[in-house]
Image (cartoon, rainbow, N blue to C red):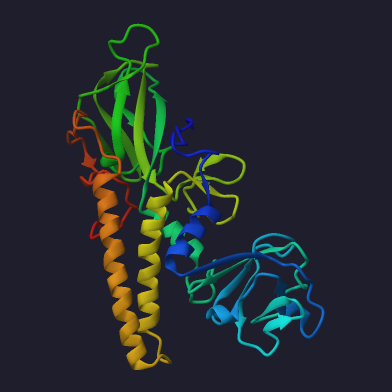
Amino acid sequence: MPTPLIVPTNVSGGGIALPRYRELLADELGFLQTTTVTTAATSGEARRVVLADELRDDEAGYGLLGTWLYVRTGVLAGTQRRILNDSEAGYQGTSSAVVLSRPLDAPLAVGTVVDITGPLPIKRHLGVKGLNDCVTEGLARCPAQAILTLELTGGSSNRLSLDDYPWLTHVDQILTISEYYGVVGANTAHPTTLPYSIATNGVSRELVLGRQYSADETVEIQATLSGDRLIYDGTTWDYRTENPGLHDDNDRAVIPEHWATTFGMSRALRFLYRWVRDNRQMNRDEKRDMLADLMIERQKWASACMVLRDQEFPRARATSGRPLIHGTVSGHGDGYPIESGASWGWSW
C-alpha cells in the first residue's frame, strides 16, 4: 500500500498523542489534576488509598468526591477508580489522601503518576462515557489528509481499483488528482482539470478518470479520510479499517489540537446532557438549571464546530475536475469524510 503524507508541517514529533488530546479536552470540560504518589499507603485499606503531597486543598473550596483517578504510569498503568468521600480521606501525616471505590491490585508505588478528572473519567466506566471516547468521536468528525501515488497497470485504462483503499468511499474526499501527463522529465505532477468519479459495482469501487492512461503511468491523489483512521500505534502509521481511534497512550493522530478539542467538547457535552436528563436521583430544580447551562454550552461548541468546518477544513480545489457519471457515483458536496451509511444531518 502506498505511503501517505501523514504529518502536517505544523505538527512536530510525528503527530499528537492521546494524552495531549485528552488533557486539552479535560481542561475545557471540567476538572483535571495530575500528581505523583509521594508516599506508599500502609494503614487501613492500603490498596484503596492514594497519598501525595499535592493532591487536595480542602481550604481552597474544592473537593474530589465524584471525580475519577486514572493511573498513568507504573505496573498498574491504565487502572481507573472513582474517588469516594471516606473517613480516611483528607490527610495522613504530611500527605493528602483520597480513597478509591474499589481496591487496586496493589498499593500505588512512590513515583506513580496519576490523573484526576471530572465530570467524566478517562476510560469508559459502565454507562459513563470516557474522555478517550470523546477524543475518538471528535477525531472521527475531522478530516486527515493523505497523498497516494498510484500506478496504473495492465494496459490502457481510465479506471483504477480502490479495493485496497476501503476508506476512500466518496468522491468529495478527493482534494486533487495530479498527473505527469505532458510533463517532461521527473518533474512535479500537476493537478488535472479532467473530470473524475467513483463508481461502485457491488462491493467493489473504482476511481474513474477523465482520460485513458497507458500502462505504468502514475497519478497522485490528495484525499481526506476520517481523522480516527490514520493512526500511529507507537511503531508505524497505518489506516485503521477496524477499531478506529486512539486506544493506547502511545497512539497518535494528525488532527490539529483545536479541531480535536472543539469536536470532542461537542460530543462530551452531548453525552452529559443526556446523562443529567436521565438522572432520576437529581433534585428537579438542580437538574433544570444544569440542563439549561449544558444547552448553552452545547450551542456554543456546536457553533465553533461549524466555523471550523466552514473555514478550516480542506476542500477540493475549484479548478479540479468534477465527477462525470460512470455507474453509481458517490459524493456529498461538503468536502470532508463520512462513515459509510451515516447521515449528513450532522450530529455534533
Determine if residue 288 is in view.
yes
- Residue 168 occupies quadrant: top left
- What residue is shown at x 50% (from left), y 68% (from top)? 130
Q: Position of residue 273 (x, y in %)?
A: 35, 76
In the foreground, 255 or 189: 255
Residue 206 drawn at (x, y percent):
32, 35
Q: Is residue 30 above or below residue 148?
A: below
Q: Position of residue 109 (x, y in %)?
A: 78, 66
Q: Report the number of numbered marks.
A: 0
Q: Horizontal and vertical percent for residue 42? A: 82, 79
Nearer to us in this view, 176 or 87:
87
Question: With respect to residue 151, does 296 lie above or below?
Answer: below
User: Does residue 122 sit above or below 332 in this rendering?
Assistant: below
Q: Quadrant of the C terminus?
A: bottom left
Residue at (44, 34) in percent of width and height: 9
Farthest right residue?
42
